[in-house]
Image (cartoon, grey):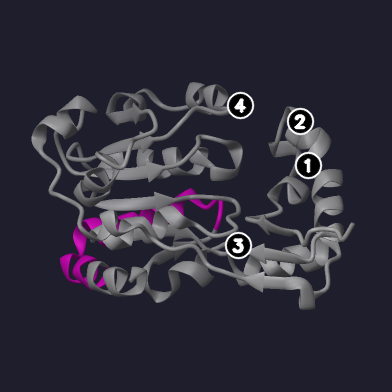
Amino acid sequence: ARRARTIITVHDCYFMRHPEDVFGPVRRDYVPLARRAAEVADAVVVVSETTAVEVEDLLGIGRNKIYVTPLGVRQEFFQAPAANCTLLRKHGIDRPFLLFVGTREKRKDLGTLLKAFDELSAESDDLQLLLVGPDAPGWRETWAETSDRVRQRTRIAPYQSMETLPAIYGAATALVMPSRWEGFGLTGLEAMATGTPVIASEVGSLPEVLGSAALFAPAEDSAAMAQQCRQVLHDTTLATQLVNKGREHAA
């Protein structure tokens, strides 16, 4: 019988770049599984040019078999309702806040974000940090090293549904993406669609995906990340430019 054609999608190869940051079956099984799946597939779909290069270099797949298909933003984010006070109070937010959305895994490098927020917290009492997303191995150790000042002004919320997430994005002063690596970075485009400025690590696919509509800082550089946050917090002209460019870029 004729073999059915097979197409696989690869979002990133971080588990090969940094095996020390992944655990259990991912560390044990993903590399041989990914290599085998990519070898036998008739086509490999990737979400960015960055991931296309990874698949070529790390999985040894010819470019003629790789197809770049970027992710899109759901319409709900472009029509985000204003966040009501009840929703924000539910998460302990009562002043301007920076937002992180994603799993609290090592790859997301929340340690750098917390250090940057510590700098900002020392300068102003009128700022909070909201972390939205599920827990992950390594997070408790990162949180344990955080200063009391940051702990008091950081709020942690679980995964949010589409009923509430767009409004939370839209209410934030900025979305911060401190990742060590991303194969795409969809949360950045989602935030842009709601009219929220984005500050991201200048690494992986993030410059490719977010372009000139975001501010960037070197990965793992908390001082640079804090400085980019200051720009958005204190320069209303720049913040407005980022809002307008972001909405256009996300569309």
The numbered mark, 3 or 1, whose residue comes first in the sequence reads 1
Foreground: 211 or 129? 211
Query: Which residue range is magenta in the image?
Result: 219-242
The local crowd at label 1, few if under 14, some if 14 to 19, many if 20 or more residues have their Cα within 10 Å, is some
Vertical position of residue 208 compared to residue 84: above or below: below
Decide: marks 2, 1 in contact (CB < 8 A)?
A: yes
Q: Which residue is mark 4?
A: 137
Question: Which residue ends up furthest to the bottom in the rendered image?
Answer: 64
Q: Which residue is mark 1?
A: 30
Q: Which residue is mark 2?
A: 25
Q: Amino acid at mark 3?
A: Gly
The numbered mark, 3 or 2, whose residue comes first in the sequence reads 2
The local crowd at label 3, few if under 14, some if 14 to 19, many if 20 or more residues have their Cα within 10 Å, is many
Q: Which residue is mark 3?
A: 204
The local crowd at label 2, few if under 14, some if 14 to 19, many if 20 or more residues have their Cα within 10 Å, is few
54 to the left or right of 102 = right
Q: Position of residue 242 (x, y in %)?
A: 27, 69
Q: Secondary structure at mark 4?
A: loop
- Image quarter where the C terminus lies is bottom left
